[in-house]
Structure formats: structure tokens, C-alpha cells
Image (cartoon, rainbow, N blue to C red):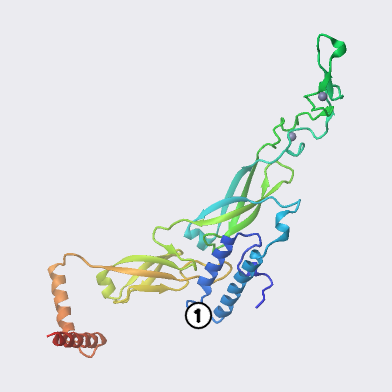
Amino acid sequence: MELDDPYRELGLAPGCSDAEVKAAWRRLSARWHPDRNSSPQALRKIQRINRALEMIRSARDEPQAQADDPAPDAEPSPIEHTIRLTLEDVVAGCVREVRGEVVEDCADCEGSGLQLQATTCSVCRGTGRIRQRLLFAWISPSVECTACQGHGETRQGCTTCAASGKAPPGKYRCRVRVAPGARAGDVLDVTARVQGSRQRTLALRVRVVLQPHEFFTAGADGTLKCELPVDGFAWMANRWIEVPTPRGLQQMRLRRGHLNYRIRNAGLPWTGEAAAADCIVTVVPLFPDELSPEQEAAIDRLVASNSGAAGTPAGDRMAAWNRVVSGWRDRRR
Ligand SMILES: [Zn+2]
Ligand SMILES: [Zn+2]
């Protein structure tokens, strides 16, 4: 299978790092793995993702002849920034401002701190040599002028930058729009304008970091996990409870005997898609340490009513287990 653009397949730009390639591949394969994704296009998609990784790897492993002599007008590498998003930011999308200061070379002297045009050396008046003043002037030798190293001309300090070679620091700020569905490690390439300069722009590379959440943990495929204490009796009674999702509270019905619940579409969204990953809720039924006399009596009634419940799946399973254990005990005698 040949892909036109393996980077686009992984949602990346060609200049990305090896780590970004790996992270994108891991994220996409977690999402599209046929073991977890039952959609009909999952198998095809995972093949494309794997092929993209292969193509990028083999292209990068090839020795690159041009790598040693970078192009003279190579773009300056982008300035790195990090933004920290909450899971709620990931769900709703957000706008973040990044700002900073950039120091670049003085344009007038190209960073040298010296004027580009040389002027005649004032010490030797352009001759490059000076006569040493000795007592006997008629035998005084001439030596090289130290001010201009014998060139006869010197370059004065640049007045624009006071000979520092640096332009005044340029402040920049940029609003970064993050679409819903961002993931940790995502990279956004944006352009910032330097304030008060003639159309000077900077390339910024903004990396997404996810803040830990109070009670959700996010998987690479966007699945959220959450552990939820519930009233043990409400759990036995199959009651409705309210479950937090990043979009707010949602009703969920408890099923006695079940601890793990999957709420479809309640996890993190995928960029540009209406569907979202799932949220997996693990309930922890809590029972009181001390029971009131009425509760004790109610439980006694439940036990009594259940002990002879043959014909029910639970009763049959208990009976089968009891037969296994008594057979095992008999063989030990
Ligand atoms: Zn000189
Ligand atoms: Zn200068």
C-alpha cells in the first residue's frame, strides 16, 4: 500500500520529531485497533496507519546527502511553547494566548556590532603602519598599526544597536485556537506577529500538555476512566445515579452485580468528528459498617429468602459450586 502523504495520515507536519511520529502512531492505533474498534473501516485504517509509520521511518533512516550542508536560507527553527489544557478544554475546545520576547540580530550590522562600511583608520591615516617614536627619528622603524591590524581601514561600532549586534527585544503574543479533541503531545504550528515591528513574524510550535483531572484519567485513545463510590443498597436496588462526564452530570442506572459501566460518547472527542471516545465508570458499592436493627432484620429476611432459590441462575450456580466443593472434600478424606 502506498500513501501519498504518510505524515498527513498521522495528522502531522513533515518537520515533526521522531517522538511526535511515535506518539501520533500510538494514539491512532489505540483508537483504530480492530480489537477495540468494531467499525468496518477500522482494519483498513490501522493498515494505513502502520504503513505511514513504516514509510516515515524508512525515509528518515536513509542517509541524507543534503543533511550536512543546510540550505543557506533555511527557516529559523520555531520557538517552542507549551499550553496546559484541562479535560474540559479538550472537550469544548479553547483559545489560549502564548506570549514571549524574542531577541534577534541587529539588521543594520547583521549581528556583527560593527558598521558594514569600513572607514579609513584614524590612527595610521590609512597607511596600515605607524612610525615608532624613538629618540633618533631618522632610524625609527615603522610597525603595523594595531588599530586596524595593518589594513588601513576599520569598521566603527554600529550605532543602531550600540555595537551589541542585537536588535531590541521584540514582544510577541499569539492566540492559539485549540479545536475540541486535542491530546497530550499534540503540536500546533502557529505564526505570531512581533509587536511594533515592520511585519516581522515568528513561527511558534505549541505543544499540548494535559493537566491531571480530579477524578478522570484519560487514555491515549481518549477513553476516560473514573471510579465512583455508590451507596451499596442503591446498587442492590438498581437505582439511577448521576455520573460526572466532562460535559456535565449524566443519569446512569446501576445494575446489581456489575461494577464496570461504559458510557458511549462520554469520553474525549476526536477532532473534527461528532463521535467521541467512551467513558468507563467503575463503581465502588459502599455498605455501612454498622447496620441498624431494621437493616439487620431486612438482610436476614433476604438471606432466608435466597437460600432455597433453586431454579434461578444464581441459585443453580451456588448449588453447582457446593457440589464441587463437597466432592473435593470427600476425595481428601
Ligand atoms: Zn590603522
Ligand atoms: Zn547593529
Residue farthest to the front?
A: 139
Instruction: Tell me the quarter of the image containing the N terminus.
Output: bottom right
Q: Nearer the viewer, residue 12 or 137?
A: 137
Q: Is residue 136 left or right of residue 7?
A: right
Is residue 332 at least partly visible in the picture?
yes
Q: Quadrant of ligand 1?
A: top right
Helix, strand or loop for disc 1: loop
190 to 150, vertically: above or below: below
Position of 265 with respect to 81 (left or right) is left
Coordinates of residue 298 in the picture (x, y in percent): 16, 75
Q: Quadrant of residue 25?
A: bottom right
Q: Looking at the rendering, which quadrant does residue 134 occupy?
A: top right
Q: 33 or 295, which lies in front?
A: 33
Horizontally, is 232 left or right of 152 in the view? left
- Image coords of residue 282 (percent x, y): 35, 69
Image position of 214 with respect to 144: above or below: below
Residue located at (27% from left, 75% from top): 237
Q: Which residue is mark 1?
A: 38
